[in-house]
Amino acid sequence: MMLSQTLAVIGFISTSFLTIRFLRSIYLYARPSSIKRYLHGADAWALVTGASDGIGRTFSHELAQNGFNVVLHGRNLTKLGTIKAQLQNQFPNVEFHVLVADASSTSHQQIDELVATLNDIHLTVLINNVGAAIKVAPLEDTTSEEIDAIINTNARFPTQLTKALLSKLTQTSSPNLIMNIGSMGDFCVPYATIYGGSKGFNMTWSSTLAMELKSEGKNVEVLAISLGRVTDVSHNKKKASFFTPSARTMARAALQRVGCGKPVVVGYVGHAVQEFFCRASAV
Ligand SMILES: NC(=O)c1ccc[n+]([C@@H]2O[C@H](COP(=O)([O-])OP(=O)(O)OC[C@H]3O[C@@H](n4cnc5c(N)ncnc54)[C@H](OP(=O)(O)O)[C@@H]3O)[C@@H](O)[C@H]2O)c1
């Protein structure tokens, strides 16, 4: 084959490959959500961790709007009580339940005890949203206590909670969902060593758990959502923009990705654009 013909074939294959990838990306952000498939049984419940503020709070609102009863987890009973009262007022036909546990210090025995209080509810959705605020500082300037608290909150607590709830989520053939909230800080924010590392851990165990459950024939979707900066959260009240969506837009986008078939995905389209350029320029 002539050199020009060989180059033409390579060009055609490369262009086709890139076109397919581009079209698949468009479909990822345009397809309808499958969240309603988890609304089975007489009364389906969702558990949202870190539900007293920010994205977790809006996840709870969106899930209630979709017809789920919601377990609101947080560490501050007063704050959770206020959120519960507001949601109850907006959704009088939905049930809400409060679960208090400090993710930075709750032991796995205490997590088991908390989970036991949920025995009577029909849990179909678990959203591991709780996360410590990002700490951007040299590792040497981070105290040992801060390191433990960040890893505990971002990685240990969601892992132990998921393990404790797994038999409940896998006991029937009806579909259930585990969603883990990550961060693009796991690869592109210098100095966010502990925060990024613990978020990266979540993305990895999501992928491996998804494969494990699939190979065991369990009908559980495990979906990790990576996200960039979000506003209307406890530490950021600036005006929303295309690259910095509000907590409401972010929660909706994450729920929109449910059923996409991937174990790890950038949840919001503006963050996907940022992620593309961050990865392209990564050293
Ligand atoms: N906002 C962003 O720019 C951004 C970017 C990437 C990833 N994320 C991730 O998105 C998730 C939600 O963050 P957010 O921005 O919505 O934060 P947020 O507004 O600060 O809300 C965090 C929620 O988690 C709770 N929480 C924090 N530490 C806790 C602990 N030790 N024990 C129990 N509950 C605790 C908070 O409770 P209190 O109300 O008591 O504080 C609150 O309900 C996190 O996993 C975060 O890492 C956020």
Image (cartoon, grey):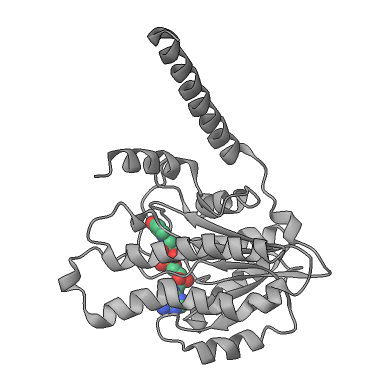
Residue occupying the far front of the picture? 1
Whether residue 115 is situated above or below residue 59 in the rendered picture:
below
Residue occupying the far right of the picture? 42
Which quarter shows the N terminus? top left
Most foreground residue, 173 or 17:
17
Residue in view at x 24 percent, y 63 percent: 136
Residue 132 on image: x %, y %: 38, 70
Residue 263 on image: x %, y %: 56, 55
- Quadrant hosting residue 105: bottom left
Q: In this view, does 178 lie to the left or right of 189?
A: right
Residue 174 on image: x %, y %: 78, 65
Residue in view at x 21 percent, y 74 percent: 142
In this rendering, the count of numbered labels is 0
Residue in view at x 57 percent, y 35 percent: 24
Whether residue 71 is situated above or below residue 68 in the rendered picture:
below
On the question of residue 13 being in view, the answer is yes
Residue 61 on image: x %, y %: 61, 62
On the question of residue 233 being in view, the answer is no
Residue in view at x 46 percent, y 60 percent: 203
Which quarter shows the C terminus? top left
Q: Is residue 213 left or right of residue 269?
A: right
Most foreground residue, 60 or 7:
7
Give the image quadrant in which the ligand numbered 1 is located.
bottom left
Most foreground residue, 105 or 218:
218
Most foreground residue, 81 or 226:
226
